[in-house]
Image (cartoon, rainbow, N blue to C red):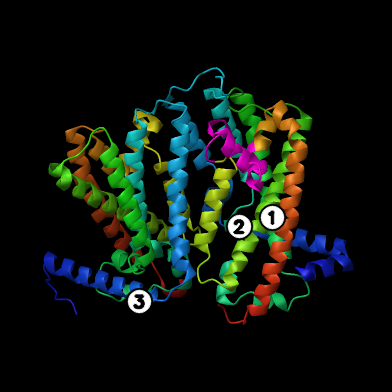
C-alpha cells in the first residue's frame, strides 16, 4: 500500500490507466464463464431480498397503510425490492481471491511487477461497479415502469445522486474491509470463516436482511455507527425521497469518509506486515 | 479389496469404517489449539444469531408468516441449524469440488472401490462443527420444549427419524448440486446453487405459496434439507404427506449419490 502512495506520487494518471486496464481484463474474465456469468453476476445478491419480499407478502398482521411505528407492507416490500437492486453495487468478498493467492504462494509474482498489487483489487472494484450498474439501471427503470408501487423510481435526481454517492463510498469501504480480511491469510490457516461471518454481520447491520423499520430504535442507532448502514439502508430511503434520510446525508458522508480513511490505514498496515511475514512459498 | 458379491450390510459396514477413519483424521488435524477452531464456531453462531434476530424482530410486527407462528419458526430454525451443522461436520469438502475437477485432483477417488460421492464429500470431518452441532441440537430441544405442541417420550422415535431425514436431505441435495460441476466445468455452479439454496430454504417454504412449496419440496427438492423434518414434526403436513416425505427423502439420497457416481464417469484427469 505504501507503494501505492509512491506510485501516486509518480503519476496518478498512470495508476488510473493501470486500474482501468485491469478492470477491462477482469470484465473479459467474468464474461467468459457463461452459465456462471448469469448466475454470479446477473443474479448476484437477488435471492435473499426477494425471499424477504415473499416473507413480507405472506405475513399476516402487517398494516397496509403506514402504522404508528412507520411499518407498512408496501413500504417494507418496496424497501426490499430497491435493496435487491442497490445491493448489487456493493463489493462482494467473493470478488477477491487474495487469501487463496497467499495460501498458494501466487502473490510472489506481483511483488516483482512494476505496479502495486492493489491495482488488481481496484480493477475488480471498477469492473464490479460498471457491470452491476449496467444491470441495475435498466432493471430499476423497467421495474419502476411496470410495478411502480413495489419498485418506486428515485424521488428526484438529487436524491438519486446522493444515494449513489453513499452507495459508491460504502462499496469502496467494503472493498477495503474484505481486502483486509483476505490479507489475514498471511497469519491464519483459514480465512473463509472470518469472511462469511463478517459478511453476515455486515448484511444485517446494513439493513439488507430485514428492513430497518422492523428494527428497534436502539439497534438502528447502534447500526448507524457502521459503514454498511450508510451503504444500503440509508441510500434506499434517500432514493425513496425520505426527508429524514436527506437530512442525514451529511452525517452519512462524514461517517463513510471516516470509515474509508480508517480502513485504508488498516489495510495498508495489515498488507505491509503480512508481506514481511510472507515466505514466498505459500502459507 | 471388496468381495464381488458383498452384501448390503457389508458395504454399509465398510463405509462406516471409512467414516470413522475420516473422523479420526479430522480430530488429529484439529488437535492443535488454533484460532481457526474458534472462528468456525463463532461463524456458525453468527449464522444462528442473524436468523434468530431476524425472526424475533419481524414477529414484533406480524402475527404469523404463511401460517407459521413464532414458536413454529423457532422449531423450524432448530432443524435448519441441525441440517447446516451436519453439512459443516461432514460435507464441507464438497465446496472444493469445482477446483478439484479443474485441477484433476479426483484420481484417487476414482480408483477406490467405494461410493464416490461418499468418499469425496465426507472426507473432511470437522471437529469444530461438532460444537455447533451441539449448540444447534440445544436450540432445537429448547424450541421443541417451548412449543405449545409439547412432546413426550413417545415422540422420541419421530424426533430421531426427523433428525435422520434432515441429514439425509442435506446429503442428497449437496450430491445433486455437485453433479452439475461435471457437466458445466468452470462455472462453480454447485457453490452458487448451495448459496442460493441457503437463501431460499432458510424460511418455511409455505411463504412461496402452494405451487412454490410443491416445486421446492418435490421438484427442486430444497425442502428435503430441513423443511420436510420441521413440517413433519410440527404436523404442518398431513399423515399421508409425512409418510410420503419419509420415503421421498431417503429415495432422493440414493438417487443423488447414484447420479453423482454416474456423472463422475465424465471426469477426466487434469482436464485432459
- Counting the numbered discs, the total is 3
Q: Quadrant location of residue B135?
A: bottom left
Say if A135 sits above or below B118 in the image.
Answer: above
Q: Are marks 3 and 2 on the same chain?
A: no
Furthest toward the right, the residue is: A10
Q: Which residue is mark 1?
A: A125
In the figure, is residue A179 to the left or right of B216? right
Label annotation for residue B66: none
Q: Quadrant of the C terminus of chain A?
A: bottom right
Q: Which residue is mark 2?
A: A95
Label annotation for residue B28: 3
Distance between the alpha carbons at the discs numbered 1 and 3: 40 Å
Say if B185 sits above or below B252 in the image.
Answer: below
Secondary structure mainly formed by the magenta segment: helix
Q: Secondary structure at mark 3?
A: helix
Part of the protein shown in magenta: A209-233
Label 2: chain letter: A
- Asked if the magenta segment contains residue A26, the reply would be no
Q: Quadrant location of residue A122?
A: bottom right
Measured from the top left, where is residue B23 in percent x and y?
A: 30, 70
Label 3: chain letter: B
- In front of the other: B111 or A169: A169
Front: mark 3 or 2: 3
In the figure, is residue B152 to the left or right of A186? left
Say if A57 sits above or below B31 in the image.
Answer: above
Proximity of marks 1 and 2: CB atoms separated by less than 8 Å = yes
Label 1: chain letter: A
Distance between the alpha carbons at the discs numbered 1 and 2: 8 Å
Amino acid at each position: 500500500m505504501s507503494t501505492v502512495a509512491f506510485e501516486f506520487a509518480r503519476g496518478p494518471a498512470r495508476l488510473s490507466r493501470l486500474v482501468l486496464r485491469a478492470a477491462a481484463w477482469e470484465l473479459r474474465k467474468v464474461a467468459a464463464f457463461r452459465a456462471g456469468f448469469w448466475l454470479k453476476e446477473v443474479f448476484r445478491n437477488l435471492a435473499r431480498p426477494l425471499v424477504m419480499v415473499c416473507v413480507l407478502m405472506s405475513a399476516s398482521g402487517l398494516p397496509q397503510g403506514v402504522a404508528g411505528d412507520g411499518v407498512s407492507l408496501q413500504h417494507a416490500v418496496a424497501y426490499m425490492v430497491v435493496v435487491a437492486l442497490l445491493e448489487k453495487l456493493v463489493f462482494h468478498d467473493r470478488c477477491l481471491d487474495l487469501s487463496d493467492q497467499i495460501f498458494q504462494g501466487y502473490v510472489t509474482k506481483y511483488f516483482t511487477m512494476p505496479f502495486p498489487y492493489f491495482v488488481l483489487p481496484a480493477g475488480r472494484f471498477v469492473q464490479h461497479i460498471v457491470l452491476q450498474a449496467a444491470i441495475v439501471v435498466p432493471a430499476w427503470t423497467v421495474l419502476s415502469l411496470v410495478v411502480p408501487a413495489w419498485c418506486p423510481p428515485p424521488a428526484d435526481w438529487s436524491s438519486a445522486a446522493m444515494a449513489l454517492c453513499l452507495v459508491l463510498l460504502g462499496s469502496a469501504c467494503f472493498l477495503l474491509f474484505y481486502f483486509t480480511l483476505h490479507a489475514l491469510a498471511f497469519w491464519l490457516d483459514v480465512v473463509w470463516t472470518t469472511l462469511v461471518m463478517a459478511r453476515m454481520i455486515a448484511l444485517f447491520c446494513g439493513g439488507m436482511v430485514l428492513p430497518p423499520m422492523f428494527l428497534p430504535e436502539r439497534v438502528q442507532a447502534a447500526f448507524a455507527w457502521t459503514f454498511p448502514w450508510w451503504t444500503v439502508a440509508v441510500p434506499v430511503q434517500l432514493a425513496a425521497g425520505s426527508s429524514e434520510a436527506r437530512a442525514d446525508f451529511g452525517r452519512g458522508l462524514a461517517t463513510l469518509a471516516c470509515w474509508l480513511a480508517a480502513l485504508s490505514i488498516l489495510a495498508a498496515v495489515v498488507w505491509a506486515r503480512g508481506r514481511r511475514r510472507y515466505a514466498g512459498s505459500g502459507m | 479389496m471388496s468381495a464381488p458379491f458383498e452384501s448390503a450390510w457389508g458395504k454399509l459396514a465398510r463405509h462406516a469404517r471409512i467414516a470413522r477413519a475420516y473422523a479420526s483424521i479430522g480430530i488429529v488435524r484439529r488437535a492443535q489449539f488454533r484460532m481457526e477452531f474458534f472462528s468456525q464456531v463463532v461463524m456458525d453462531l453468527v449464522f444462528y444469531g442473524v436468523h434468530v434476530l431476524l425472526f424475533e424482530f419481524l414477529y414484533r410486527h406480524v402475527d404469523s408468516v404463511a401460517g407459521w407462528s413464532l414458536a413454529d419458526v423457532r422449531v423450524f430454525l432448530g432443524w435448519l441449524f441441525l441440517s447446516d451443522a451436519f453439512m459443516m461436520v461432514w460435507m464441507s469438502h464438497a465446496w472444493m469440488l469445482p477446483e478439484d475437477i479443474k485441477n484433476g485432483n479426483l484420481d484417487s477417488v476414482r480408483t477406490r472401490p467405494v461410493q464416490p460421492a461418499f468418499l469425496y464429500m465426507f472426507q473432511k470431518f470437522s471437529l469444530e462443527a461438532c460444537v455447533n452441532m451441539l449448540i444447534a441440537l440445544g436450540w432445537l430441544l429448547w424450541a421443541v420444549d417451548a412449543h405449545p405442541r409439547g412432546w413426550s417420550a413417545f415422540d422420541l422415535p419421530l424426533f430421531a427419524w426427523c433428525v435422520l431425514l434432515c441429514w439425509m436431505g442435506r446429503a442428497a441435495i449437496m450430491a445433486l448440486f455437485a453433479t452439475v460441476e461435471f457437466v458445466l466445468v468452470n462455472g462453480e455452479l454447485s457453490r452458487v446453487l448451495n448459496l442460493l439454496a441457503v437463501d431460499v430454504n432458510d424460511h418455511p417454504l409455505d411463504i412461496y405459496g402452494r405451487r412454490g412449496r410443491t416445486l421446492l419440496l418435490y421438484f427442486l427438492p430444497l425442502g428435503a434439507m430441513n423443511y420436510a423434518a420441521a413440517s413433519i414434526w410440527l404436523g404442518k403436513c398431513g399423515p399421508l404427506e409425512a409418510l410420503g416425505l419419509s420415503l421421498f427423502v431417503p429415495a432422493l439420497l440414493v438417487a443423488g449419490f447414484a447420479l453423482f457416481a454416474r456423472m463422475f464417469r465424465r471426469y477426466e484427469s487434469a482436464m485432459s
